[in-house]
Image: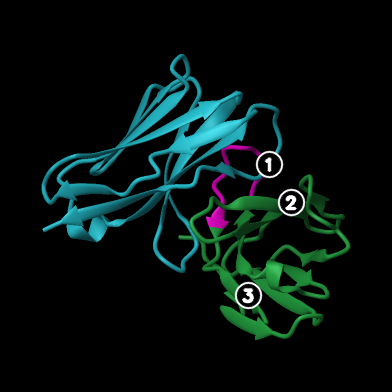
Amino acid sequence: GAVVSQHPSRVICKSGTSVKIECRSLDFQATTMFWYRQFPKQSLMLMATSNEGSKATYEQGVEKDKFLINHASLTLSTLTVTSAHPEDSSFYICSASSGSHPSDEQFFGPGTRLTVL
Amino acid sequence: SQKIEQNSEALNIQEGKTATLTCNYTNYSPAYLQWYRQDPGRGPVFLLLIRENEKEKRKERLKVTFDTTLKQSLFHITASQPADSATYLCALVESGGGADGLTFGKGTHLIIQP
């Protein structure tokens, strides 16, 4: 099956620093990549949708200047949390889809646990 | 307001029995509804997708039903095993076309007791 990887799996950083998370589709070309955030015992919340070569579409309430998304190729998307603060501590998960239809399966990465001290 | 509700309490089922999980939604018109399994500290894994014009889908020991009148989906695991213990998430995609992100429920924690 299709595999999506994320790196790093865990990161601990100091408040005010920036953190970059990579999401890669290993064996397929991802037309669309999605970034989700999950707080403990909460549902996954969609943060943004990115298509290769174009600007990401952010969900309401998600600051685009704080969460920078780059989808430079069909196999790589990055999420940079700029000037991270403790409230940004969460589990960040990406997913990738090879199609453009709602029924096209999304394959999820293993997630990145971010802890901001 | 829009809501997706799943049983918030953990569901304890004896091994070998059928586990039934519920997903109710409000103020959505989903084109598709999907079920995922999530283990602690891991990303969700896709299990089944059911379309708005389908009533039932099966895959091995799994069965999903979709009732757009009741605005409800039921997820069944037959002959449950301890390895089925996990959190199960329902997620939907609204009608409207294009590749959209999923809207997830909080999930139901299922515990299969040997």
**Figure quadrant of residue A53:** bottom right
Callout 1 and callout 2 share a chain: no
**Image quadrant containing the C terminus of chain B:** bottom left
Residue located 87% across and 55% down the image: A55
Say which amino acid is labelled 1: Ala
Camera sees residue A31: no
Q: Main secondary structure of the magenta part?
A: loop
Instruction: In the picture, one chain is green; tell me its letter.
Output: A
**For the residue carrying disc 1, how many other residues have a C-alpha within 10 Å: few (<14), some (14-19), or many (20+)?**
many
A22 or A51, which lies in front? A22
| Magenta stretch holds residue A117 | no
Figure check: A107 above or below A101:
below
Image colour assigned to chain B = cyan
Quarter holding the N terminus of chain B is: top right
Q: Amino acid at mark 2?
A: Thr
Q: Amino acid at mark 3?
A: Leu
Q: Which residues are magenta?
A: A98-107
The mark found on residue B99 in the picture is 1
Identify the subunit bearing mark 1.
B
Q: Nearer the viewer, residue B22 or A51?
A: B22
Horizontal side of A79 relative to B89 (left or right) equals right
- Residue at horizontal 46%, vertical 66%? B42
User: Residue A51 at what x, y percent from top left?
Assistant: 77, 53
The residues tagged by marks 3 and 1 sit, at their Cα atoms, a distance apart of: 27 Å
Question: Element at badge 2?
Answer: strand
Tag of residue A49: 2
Mark yes or no: residue A60 visible: yes
Circles 1, 2 touching at the beta carbon (< 8 Å): yes
Disc 3 target residue: A114
